[in-house]
């Protein structure tokens, strides 16, 4: 049977290992890719915010146009 000090050591070791795994760095998209995504989002927002969509109120032609754009 394992003694109390060994159990404590094992518990600390497991905790530190799990913490280290959880803190692994998350890689983000490369800068060029992020810039392209941002550019596309801004273009989509500009289109959806235009007067051509008529406010996008439910039950209006603006809603139909918005749904078609998003598909």
Image (cartoon, rainbow, N blue to C red):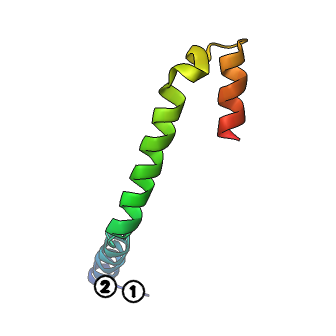
Q: Are marks 1 and 2 in contact (CB under 8 Å)?
A: yes
Q: Measured from the top left, where is residue 11 in percent x and y?
A: 34, 75
Q: Quadrant of the N terminus?
A: bottom left
Residue found 46% across the figure and 45% down from its top: 41
- In the image, 3 versus 58, the foreground residue is 58
Q: Which mark is residue 6?
A: 2
SS assignment at label 1: loop
Q: Residue 55 — which label?
A: none
Name the element at disc 2: helix
Residue occupying image coordinates x 73% and y 23%: 64
Residue drawn at 44 percent across, 55 percent down: 37
Which one is in front, 39 or 7? 39
Location of residue 70 (image quadrant): top right
Q: Position of residue 31 (x, y in %)?
A: 32, 67
Question: In the rendered image, which residue does mark 1 sit on?
Answer: 2
Q: Is residue 26 visible?
A: no
The answer to whether 62 appears left or right of 32 in the picture is right
The quadrant of the image that shows the C terminus is top right
- Residue at 37%, 74% (x, y): give it: 21
- In this view, 61 is above or below 26: above
Above/below status of 67 relative to 22: above
Furthest residue in direction bottom, as rendered: 1
Left or right relative to 66: residue 40: left
């Amino acid at each position: 049977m394992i003694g109390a000090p060994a159990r404590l050591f094992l518990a600390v070791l497991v905790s530190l290992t799990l913490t280290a795994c959880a803190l692994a760095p998350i890689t983000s998209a490369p800068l060029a890719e992020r810039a392209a995504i941002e550019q596309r989002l801004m273009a989509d927002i500009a289109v959806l915010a235009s007067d051509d969509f008529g406010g996008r109120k439910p039950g209006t032609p603006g809603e139909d146009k918005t749904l078609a754009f998003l598909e």
